[in-house]
Amino acid sequence: MNARTADRVATALFWLGAILLVALLGGLLGYIVYHGGRHITWDFLTSPPETIRAGGGIGPQLFNSLYLLILSMAITVLIGLPAGIFLAEYARPGLVTEAVRFSIETLSSLPSIVVGLFGLLVFVVLTGWGYSLMAGALALTVINLPLIVRVSEEAIRSVPHDLREGSLALGASQWQTIWKVVMPCAFPGILTGVIIAAGRVFGEAAALLYTAGMSSPRLHFGLWNPAHPSSPLNPFRPAETLAVHIWKVNAEGLIPDLRRVGDGAAAVLVLVVLGFNLGARWLGRRIHRRLTAA
């Protein structure tokens, strides 16, 4: 096989792989949305679920998933981004750096069910919080932290070194160089990691079974005191998320219309993740243009 033929074969294989990937995603999304989209109504999105009778919705579960996303990503980014900056800009070869990298590799290899059992012991039992949104958010932080650290480090390392030298030559400190020169350039890469981690928060169920719980108290959406047990903003109340609700309905549901609820909830879950990804990318491009004037 000559070089030109080999190049054409390789190009065809690359195109085939890309087309198969898009077809797989499109088929999966189409199947879920086709079967579940017809059940999505305003009443389905806002009403509470039923345990025995037909006609329930997913209102509390949808709110819990969004609230858990905010809590978990706030904690994850708050810890993961400084750790990524440290590894990319400050860390020198040594025992501390090796310990940090070993911790990241070990955390990234843990199955989510093991993290859930760890969260049950530490965040539920030892803290005395019981099943709660905060326990679930911390368990998801353990799962997503290695991803955020690695993505942040790689995005910061990919920024050309000439930009740093130019900033330092103009008299800026290292911190000013990182904040005003490096971070805007690394922002798209960091945003990609945040989007992937956010999608995992929506879809995760195994770890949340042992930390956030499989039920929600009756919520009063007009009560916004975060310390009240019935307030939707209370982070220390049990919270069944959308992914856990889908598993629960299909595994042990007693309602007559469990197929309707399961299909509709799965379609909502997929559409929310898709909408979040598209919205985050659009917002990220706008922020990147504003920061870099590109």
Image: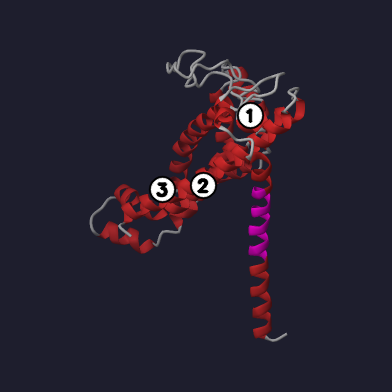
Q: Does the image show residue 95? A: no
Relative to 264, is 289 above or below?
A: below
Q: Classify mark 3: residues with Cα within 10 Å, few (<14), some (14-19) or many (20+).
A: few
Please identify the dominant SS of the magenta region: helix
Q: Secondary structure at mark 2?
A: helix
Relative to 231, is 174 above or below?
A: below
Quadrant in which the N terminus is drawn: bottom right
Q: Secondary structure at mark 3?
A: helix
Q: Is residue 281 magenta?
A: no
Q: Classify mark 1: residues with Cα within 10 Å, few (<14), some (14-19) or many (20+).
A: many
Looking at the image, which residue is at 76% across and 22% down? 254
Which residue corresponds to mark 1?
A: 208
Residue 281 lies, in percent from the top left, at: 46, 50
Relative to 158, is 127 above or below?
A: above
Which residue corresponds to mark 3?
A: 283
Q: Which residues are magenta?
A: 17-30
Residue 4 lies, in percent from the top left, at: 65, 85
